[in-house]
Amino acid sequence: MLIFNGIVFFVTANLYRFAGMLGEYRIFACTVIILFFLLGNIRPCLRDGKIPSRRLRICLQGSDLLILFCVSTAASTLYLLLEIGQLFSGEAKVWLLHLLNVFLVEAACFWNGIVRVYLTSKQLAIKWRLLGVICGFMPIVNLVVLYHIIKITGYEAKLEGEKLLVDESRTGRRICATKYPVLLVHGVFFRDFKYLNYWGRIPAELEKNGATIYYGNHQSADSVEGSAKELAQRIRQITEETGCEKVNIIAHSKGGLDCRYALSEFGIAEKVASLTTINTPHRGCLFADYLLEKIPQNVQQKAADTYNKAVRVLGDEDPDFMEAVRDLTAGACEARNRYIRDAAGVYYQSVGSKCDRAVNGRFPLNFTYHLVKYFGGENDGLVSTESFPWGESFRLVTVKGRRGISHGDMIDLNRENIPGFDVREFYVDLVSELKQKGY
């Protein structure tokens, strides 16, 4: 279908030249070609019929229209160049009318496609939309940007469409319906907001597959002990209000340290079935030690005061920026690890990831990546991979090629579809494994 439409679009773009070759059937043939061109602009392919989402179907159609635009424009440009001699042989008018025909047809195809993807794609975000507008009239650069727009939107429609079909096929199975509910615990410098979810698209995907989800709702910045105390109270609240007896904890970054402390020191082990730590610096961050040594005390205190004041407005009652940072140092983690013990009867496991290039971490992880690498080797942009392992099992997540998976990617912070790593499906597998273990 796409190849057929490519031929139709090319013929339509050059119809001014081809019409003379059609003889007595010219009017009928031109009418049929234009009709197919209009139909192709409405439905450029048939593969979208497998996608159970109108938004994604339109997105895929837009991506395909942009592909048709590129192919048809390239072929039409070559045709125009082959006949450019007409400009100098007294047939300039014919060549210019041919050029106008190409321009109008290709413009219709392009704008039909670009409007569709701009209105329906979630993966383009603001970045690529702005680049498309800014670079639209920059030769070569605009082609590079268009290539990325086509790649991103086509992959989005394909991946999201397949996910919808998979979710539909397993609706009744409730593979994430664990015996005990899942408690998601955020890391440092974030909060659990209702409409700006720290965990991105993950909670919705888990709930779609049967999971019951709760959040830590603790402060964004405090010492490990202070956060652990809040989380212990939260766990007691959940078990008392719901009668669920226990929870399965999935904790990211510093949240893993907070939960280990709560289990060891605040008597809630009997209310926890499992603890899964995600990219948690169990052995600390040498990078944090370095920053505390190099940054002047007055600068540290000013940053802390500014942060604490800002997050109080957002709901933190007694934030402590400096204590949170100090408790992430290698020295602080080493000291805690000497007396914190894993709770008997609780299943501990850990997950980590690594970036292969700084640029894939996004700001500020693209900046910290090199510093962490200098002190601790392979890392996720913030934490060394050697610091991740804890518990009965550990898995390191990455992808083929040079992309890697960052600290933020592991919680779907940027809501980005990463080729080779579906973060939502990763958590579905993680929770379904907990279900299979009886938790």
Image (spheres, grey):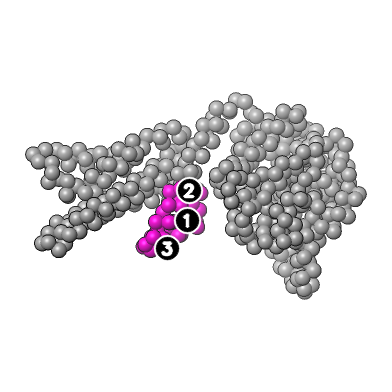
Query: How would you rate the neighbour count of disc 3 (Cα within 10 Å): few for under 14, some for 14-19, many for 20 or more?
Result: few
Q: Does 230 appear in magenta? A: no
The answer to whether the residues at label 1 and label 2 have Cβ atoms under 8 Å apart is: yes
Query: Up-down: is 38 above or below 126?
Result: above
Residue lying furthest left: 24
Q: Which residue is mark 1?
A: 128
Q: Is residue 333 left or right of residue 170?
A: right
Q: Main secondary structure of the magenta part?
A: helix
Q: Position of residue 80 (x, y in %)?
A: 23, 55
Q: Which residue is mark 2?
A: 152
Which of marks 1 and 3 precedes in the sequence?
1
Residue at 47% across / 41% down in the picture? 157
Which of marks 2 and 1 precedes in the sequence?
1
Q: Amino acid at mark 1?
A: Trp
> Which is nearer the eye, 31 or 263?
31
| Image quarter of residue 393 | top right
- The residues colored magenta run 123-151
Query: How would you rate the neighbour count of disc 2 (Cα within 10 Å): few for under 14, some for 14-19, many for 20 or more?
Result: many
Query: Which label belongs to residue 134?
Result: 3
Q: Quadrant of the C terminus?
A: top right
The answer to whether the residues at label 3 and label 2 have Cβ atoms under 8 Å apart is: no
> Which is nearer the eye, 365 or 22?
22
Query: Up-down: is 259 above or below 177?
Result: below
Residue at 27% across / 44% down in the picture? 9
Q: Position of residue 249 (x, y in %)?
A: 75, 41
Q: Amino acid at mark 3?
A: Ile
- Which-is-in-front pick, marks 3 and 2? 2
Query: What whole-number distance in Å separates the C-alpha atoms at marks 3 and 2?
Result: 18 Å
Q: Position of residue 45 (x, y in %)?
A: 36, 37
Q: Is residue 77 visible?
A: yes
